[in-house]
Image: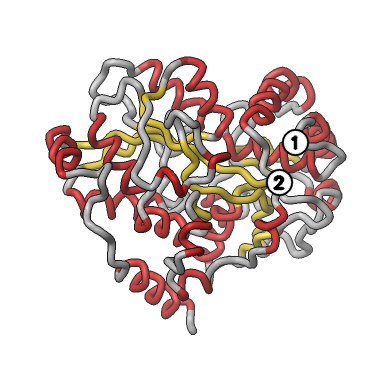
Amino acid sequence: MTRITRRAALAASTASLALPAIASAQTAALLAAAKKDGKLNVIALPPDWANYGEIISSFEKKYGIHVNSAAPDDSSAQELQAIRSLKGQTRGPDTVDVGPAFALTGVKEGLWQPYKVATWATIPANMKDPNGLWYGDYFGIITLGVNRSVVKNPPKTWADLLKPEYKGMVALNGSPLGAAAAFSAVYAAALGNGGSLDNIAPGIDYFGKLAKAGNFNPASATPASLQSGTTPIVLNWDYLNLAQAKKSAGKVQIDTVVPAGSQPLGAFYCQAISKYAPNPASAKLWMEFLYSDEGQLLFLKGFAHPARFADLAKRNAIPPALAKALPPSAPYASAAFPTAAQQDKAKNVISAEWSKIVKA
């Protein structure tokens, strides 16, 4: 099957899914209230991140509610700051998509309002707050995205990245002080360099060595910078590197590499509704959509494993064409997922030590 034919098959498979009528929690009253809101404010959702472009357009088409997508390149920390600074304003975020450590910060600060979607029971217990303040929406593992036009001999291990041939090439998706993707990359480096889920320090030390060797590129990597070769080696989520490889096919070869000899680091992002949401009904409707089979499969179409993946697989709800397009399952089966407490501890260590060791 050609790349174009496969893309068409995937689109057809997803579009043909027959979905049930609005579920019990997603009542006609909720839809009516959302229509009265008239819009939904989201933040930090790049269209090429986990298929959010199609997810947003699908929501708008399904419910006729316009989505204001602000600051698509903001970090998790900036999402929280937007809620604080725009409190009481009509342009304030209704929902956020943040890393677990930042979701916990929001809980401590009282930034979220509780809500449990209709499919709540099928979200794994370790991916949700028991009171419904936040819940994981999708997960992935940290990989190396490698532009083969620039990198002729792709690295395969963490040790490889320290080689002189990769000078100035290795970048992160943002800063680990505020971006969950970069934070998780440092966590992954810890697992590959003698650390553990309880000890992120070796990961910080590792990046200090990368910086000292001149291999660390302090620029915040983007899909465009990976494709152009400005940041030819990017430590990032598998779904972002895989999506960029698909988008770049025929132009530039992008390899997605799981570092060998190390347990993969897995992590999920979390959805939460702002306590100060100016469009609360739309926010709840958005959550219902994201956690429906349709929404979860749209994440999967973007190579991000949805929170309800096990439930979808158990019910044979994943279209064969979509399943065939996914990478091998072995790295996901062996991935290590830090607990919320471990991430919170690691975040504190990063905050205290990163700037002392890694000089941008």
Where is the C terminus found, in terms of image quarters? Answer: top right
Q: Do the residues bearing badges 2 and 1 touch, measured as CB atoms within 8 Å?
A: yes
The residue tagged with tag 1: helix, strand or loop? loop
Colouring? secondary structure
Q: Which mark is residue 336?
A: 2
Q: Residue at x 64, y 41 (%)?
A: 172
Examine the rendered structure and indicate whether residue 152 appears above or below residue 136. Answer: below
Q: Which mark is residue 79?
A: none
Q: Residue at x 30, y 42 (%)?
A: 286
- Is 184 positioned to the left or the right of 309 in the image? right
- Which kind of residue does numbered mark 1 sit on? Leu
Q: Nearer the viewer, residue 281 or 150?
A: 281
Whole-percent x, y for residue 211 in the image: 79, 35
Q: Which mark is residue 197?
A: 1
- Is 244 positioned to the left or the right of 201 in the image? left
Mark 1: give few (<14), some (14-19) or many (20+) Cα within 10 Å: some
Q: Earlier in the sequence, mark 2 or mark 1?
A: 1
Examine the rendered structure and indicate whether residue 279 appears above or below residue 84. Answer: below
- Which kind of residue does numbered mark 2 sit on? Ala
Q: Residue at x 35, y 21 (%)?
A: 275
Q: Where is residue 272, by image quadrant?
A: top left
Q: Residue at x 50, y 64 (%)?
A: 313
Whole-percent x, y for residue 83 in the image: 38, 21
